Image: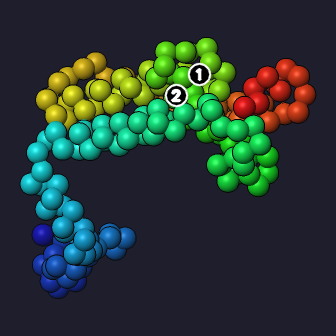
Amino acid sequence: MDGEGAAHGDGNPHGHAEGAWPPGAYQQVEPDRLTRFVLRVHARSPRWAAPLAALGCVGIGMAYALVSDPTRSDPDAAPSCLLKLTTGLDCPGCGGTRALWYVLHGDLPAAARHHFVFVFALPFLAYLFVAWAGKQAFGWRLPELRISSPVIAGFLAVWLAFSVARNLPWAPFTALYV
């Protein structure tokens, strides 16, 4: 014994009662019923369930873009984006659905016209999804796409600059207005 535990008289070298939490430690909270249910479902579900569910969500979004044809709205129709409806400004994602529609039809210049950042990011997002889903469902080990924090910060800065520039009311920025 090192004397510290002996000084407390409990034989514990850390100086606190057996079973008590040390100072500054967080006590683990008992999960609620919903959390326990989700954990049970996750433990019992097959490996391919999460990638399939994610693929289903992406498929539903793509089907919506194809069926709704966002490129055919009336010129005087009210915008569906709340920010554009209330302020008249394009939001950071404005034009994304139209860009997806054009990508699905193979018209990359028109897609880039509506949302260049989305079109640029699409191959990276697709690869990240395939790598994750392949690993989850089939155990594939595709080369890992390592994206550092400065690269992510740079991408977000470019996206922010694009979002601001597309709302400026003078040329050449008016060409970015959708």
Q: Quadrant of the N terminus?
A: bottom left
The residue tagged 2 is: 101
| Residue appearing at x 75%, y 26% in the figure | 176
| Observer able to see residue 7 | no
Residue at horizontal 26 percent and vertical 44 percent from the top: 53
| Image coordinates for residue 96, horizontal then vertical, percent | 58, 34
- Of mark 1 and mark 2, the one earlier in the sequence is 2
Scheme of image coloration: rainbow
The mark lying in front, picked from 1 and 2, is: 2
Q: CA distance from mark 1 to mark 2?
A: 8 Å
Whole-percent x and y of residue 65? Answer: 49, 35
At label 1, the amino acid type is: Ala
Residue 77's spot in the image, x, y percent? 72, 45
Q: Which numbered circle lies on residue 98? A: none
For label 1, the residue is: 111
Q: Is residue 84 visible?
A: yes
Give the percent coordinates (x, y) of residue 31.
Answer: 24, 72
Examine the image and state in which quarter residue 126 appears: top left
Q: Secondary structure at mark 2?
A: helix
Q: Amino acid at mark 2?
A: Trp
Give yes or no for contact between labels 1 and 2 (Cβ–Cβ under 8 Å): yes
Q: Residue at x 79, y 51 (%)?
A: 87
Q: Say left or right for 178 vs 66.
A: right
Disc 1 element? helix
